Image (cartoon, helix red, strand yellow):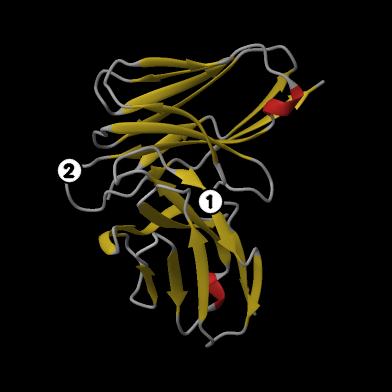
Amino acid sequence: GQQLNQSPQSMFIQEGEDVSMNCTSSSIFNTWLWYKQEPGEGPVLLIALYKAGELTSNGRLTAQFGITRKDSFLNISASIPSDVGIYFCAGRYSGGGADGLTFGKGTHLIIQP
Amino acid sequence: KAGVTQTPRYLIKTRGQQVTLSCSPISGHRSVSWYQQTPGQGLQFLFEYFSETQRNKGNFPGRFSGRQFSNSRSEMNVSTLELGDSALYLCASSLGVSAEAFFGQGTRLTVV
């Protein structure tokens, strides 16, 4: 089955720093989604990407859909305390078979004031 | 606009019992998918429904089943519960099968 490698697993940063995380896949995806999950809550959609090469921003967040369709990255600029949480990438290939989202294992972001 | 609603939020069941979880999607969304989240395996796809039809199924045993009603609400059922079924079960809704998926808060199932 499809596998997503998400890195890093965790990040300890200072408030105000920029953050970068990425996901790579063993196969191509048609859609990349980035989610944030906080304790006791479901994942919240941050950014959706539908086209290879696409670069999309949502406030301080920027994500890109890799040209090979096998990778994506998420950047967070000037981190603030409320950015703390677990960030997940998710990919979908809508070409038959299991079309559900395949998730990475998550990047745990911890911000030190 | 109301988000995805899952009930109940918490559930404790005994091994061997069965359980039914409920999901009400965002108004106008016709696709509902279910995921299991555990610390060891992460988020794993269970199945997806669109217009009352199961479109896709993940790699889970037949004890896991679901259905979708004409109003797009969905239920998932787990029979003969095992300890390993303890997890956060998440429901996501989307306009269509390949569209952006929005998650509910989940149902925390504990099997004892």
Callout 1, which amino acid?
Answer: Val
Determine which residue is flagged by label 1. B4
- Considering every residue shown, the one lying at the far bottom of the view is B16
Q: Nearer the viewer, mark 2 or mark 1?
A: 1
Determine which residue is flagged by label 2. A95
Residue occupying image coordinates x 54% and y 86%: B17
x, y percent for residue B83: 56, 76
Q: Is residue A92 above or below residue A72?
A: below
- Considering every residue shown, the one lying at the far left of the view is A96
Callout 2, which amino acid?
Answer: Gly
**Is B50 left, or right, of B112 in this rendering?**
left
For the image, the number of numbered tags is: 2
x, y percent for residue B59: 32, 63
Q: Is residue B16 above or below residue B48?
A: below
Mark number, residue B107: none
Q: Residues within 10 Å of mark 1 (few under 14, many from 20)?
A: many
Residue occupying image coordinates x 68% and y 12%: A17
Q: Is residue A77 above or below residue A73?
A: above
Q: Secondary structure at mark 1?
A: loop
**Is B11 left, or right, of A44 in this rendering?**
right
Q: Nearer the viewer, residue B2 or A45?
A: B2
x, y percent for residue A19: 59, 18
Quarter of the picture holding the C terminus of chain A: top right
Q: CA distance from mark 2 to mark 1?
A: 26 Å
Query: Do dots 2 and 1 share one subunit?
Result: no
Judging from the image, mark 2 belongs to the subunit labelled: A
Residue occupying image coordinates x 31% and y 20%: A66
